[in-house]
Amino acid sequence: MDCADLPELDVSPSGYEPIDVICTIENTAAVGATKVEITSEWLGGSEASMMGATGEYSIDAGGSEEFTVTFTGDTKQASSNSYDFEIFATVTEWSSIPMNEPFPQENDSYTDTLQIASYGAVELEIQGGSTETVEAGSEFVIELQFTNNGNDADNVRVDIVNLNSLKTQGFSFIGSEFVAEQLAAGATSAIREIKILAPSDADGDINVDLQFRASSTNDPSAEFSETNIPVTVESSKSSGSLTDGISEVGQDDMILYGAIAGGVILLLLLLGVVRRSVKKKKAKMDEATPIELDDDDDQEVDEFDDLFDDLDDVVIESDEFDDLLDDF
């Protein structure tokens, strides 16, 4: 008896199929037909099974017969599982003569082990918010975490799908442009970071999607786990304002400018008061009675006394500051 090579059993949720193996039994006798009974012994656990390794076949001299053995197993089981088995071919009759005691004969057997194939399955999660808004030229961090949902240890890797496009738009990366971690089956990674520097010379806001993809290293056929993060880069040109410029002026400069402005206002007020006073004085002097001078040459006249006498005639009837405010 001989059986075909037994492949590993794929127990992944997406690719699972039972395995069929063809076994052949042959009557090597020169004469006489034989009856052969097929039995088996399953030495593995309950998560897999073998069917078809039973039955009785009548084979002519020099002839052969085939039978199919089917192997099945539970999906998602660990790749470390394995199942030993043995198939027996026993001659129970030859040329119509029963092969009982004392002539039973076990002609042949086939022994093998069913191995469970490794498969990859990954799950990617982005920590924090689902969107990012950053200033032009600033650094920001994307935090990632991923899980190995496969049935074997796997080096899970996360890449940026549109990396080249981002670089063309002015984005740069601080450190690694990808993250990877060796994880046991069912294990979750630590929180990993990808540091990105936003473009600094954009004329306007930039809106892009960061496209992340997690993949299995030991199973190229495994499905990817992908997610996108919308990112808005606010341009420094579009977000600048007058208040931004004012905020950059130092405190000492503000004090100096305030003092200058206060001095100018005070000067204007003083000039207004003087102008108003001069007008009133001129009006009073025009209405005053002319002063007669004594013709006596011996009389001494004090010019300054006369000047102050004229000022004594000036009567301020209202508050100069009130008149100044009226003019304004």
Image (cartoon, rainbow, N blue to C red):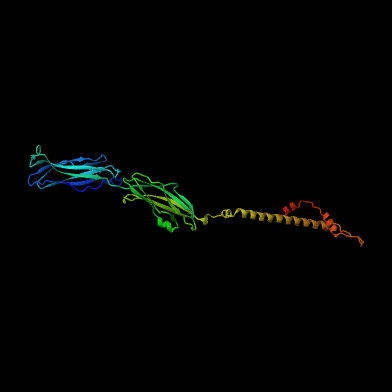
Viewer-proximal residue, 190 or 228? 190
Image quarter (top left, top right, bottom left or bottom right) of the C terminus: bottom right
Pinpoint residue 263: horizontal percent, then vertical percent: 68, 55
Q: Quadrant of residue 241?
A: bottom right
Pinpoint residue 39: horizontal percent, then vertical percent: 17, 40
Q: Residue furthest bottom?
A: 297
**Residue 52 visible:** no
In the image, is 269 to the left or to the right of 153? Answer: right
Viewer-proximal residue, 289 or 146? 146
In the image, is 275 to the left or to the right of 74? Answer: right
Viewer-proximal residue, 98 or 310? 98
**Residue 155 visible:** yes
Q: Residue furthest top?
A: 101
Pinpoint residue 55: horizontal percent, then vertical percent: 16, 41
In the image, is 97 to the left or to the right of 153? Answer: left
Pinpoint residue 284: horizontal percent, then vertical percent: 82, 56
Viewer-proximal residue, 248 or 286? 248
289 up-or-down from 24: above or below: below
Q: Quadrant of residue 168?
A: bottom left
